[in-house]
Each structure stands twice: as C-alpha cells, then as structure tokens.
Amino acid sequence: MYQDIQKRVIVEELVDGYRRTLEENGLPDRSPNDVPEPDGDVPTTYLWTLYFLAQHFSHIGQHPRALSLLSSAITHTPTLPELHALRGRILKRLGDFGGASIAVNDARLLDGQDRFLNTKSAKYKLRAGLIEEAGDTFGLFTKVSGMPFPFLLLILGTLFSERCREPWR
C-alpha cells in the first residue's frame, strides 16, 4: 500500500474521515455497569482508528502528527500497553532514545508478565545507554538474586553484550 501513493492517500483520507465522523457524532460516555447498545463498540473503534492513524503517519514520516494522535489515544485509554509501545517506537524514529525508553517502560509496567514488553523495554534502555536499568529489566527473567549480569551474559550473551556496547560507539 505504501509503494502506491494513490492507495496510501485514499486509505489515509478514508480512515481520517472515519475518525472525524466518530468525533463529530460524539463518543458515548458510559459507566462500566451500563448495558452495551448496538453501537457500543464505538469507543473501541475510535481507539484503534487513532492507533492505526498514528502508525500510518509515523510510517510516512509525519511523526508530530502521529504523536498527537497517539496522545489522544493514550488520554482515551491510558492502560493499553500497545499505545505506549508505539509511542516509544515513534520517539526512537525521532532519535529520542531516552524518551523512547521511558515510553516502552511505561508499556512494560502496564503488563509486567509480558515477556515481549520486558525484552523491548530492556533493549530500549540499552539503546538509551541505561545499562544498569536494562540489566535489571533483563534480570526479571532470571531467578538469580543480586546482580544478574553474569547470568545474562550466559543466557543472552550475544544480544546483551552487543547492546551494551552500542551506547559507546
């Protein structure tokens, strides 16, 4: 889709128009005890529309617009780890490795049992030069108390040592 500019523009116009329609018609405010109505999926649809558009605009290099949409999505549903992880990816693309590390760590903290998010968070910390914090995050996978670095070098040798040296290149 991104190789054909016309297709990209059509999809962008359609999805952004859909987002505007959802905003103009108003998003229902419901308490968790309300009985869902037939259009009860509107808040979820709106959220994933924002997520798609944020990915789309980041992919085509419009990072400020992507971050703006993502900010709206995070305000809408602050407990969704995918939003924080995408924010980290966008900040990484902008070269803000410290901010990216914080964003991905926020995602990790929302779901501490997710090994993918734990690993991503540790990798982003290494990229930001936060070696100690990255070791602690990688250490969450180990049963070794204290300093997990020697154990990490055994089980994640190549990955961990390669990433540890990146900040000094």
Image (tube, rainbow, N blue to C red):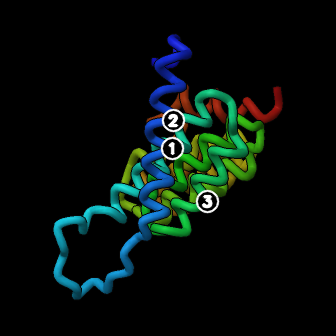
Q: Nearer the viewer, residue 82 or 76?
A: 76
The part of the image, by quadrant, that contains residue 167 is top right
Residue 68 locus on image (x, y percent): 66, 53
Measure how far apart labels 3 and 1 are at the Cα level: 16 Å
Q: Residues within 10 Å of mark 2 (few under 14, many from 20)?
A: few
Among numbered discs 3 and 2, the one appearing first in the sequence: 2
User: In the visual, does 100 lie left or right of 41?
Assistant: right
In the image, what residue type sits under mark 3? Ser
The part of the image, by quadrant, that contains residue 161 is top right
User: In the visual, does 147 lie left or right of 82?
Assistant: right
Instruction: Give the labeled residue for mark 3.
Output: 71
Q: Secondary structure at mark 2?
A: helix
Whether residues under marks 3 and 1 lie with C-beta atoms below 8 angstroms apart, the answer is no
Measure how far apart labels 2 and 1 are at the Cα level: 5 Å
Instruction: Give the labeled residue for mark 2.
Output: 13
In the image, what residue type sits under mark 1? Asp
Residue drawn at x 42%, y 65% is 25
Whether residues under marks 2 and 1 lie with C-beta atoms below 8 angstroms apart, the answer is yes
In the image, what residue type sits under mark 2? Glu
Q: Nearer the viewer, residue 58 or 37?
A: 37
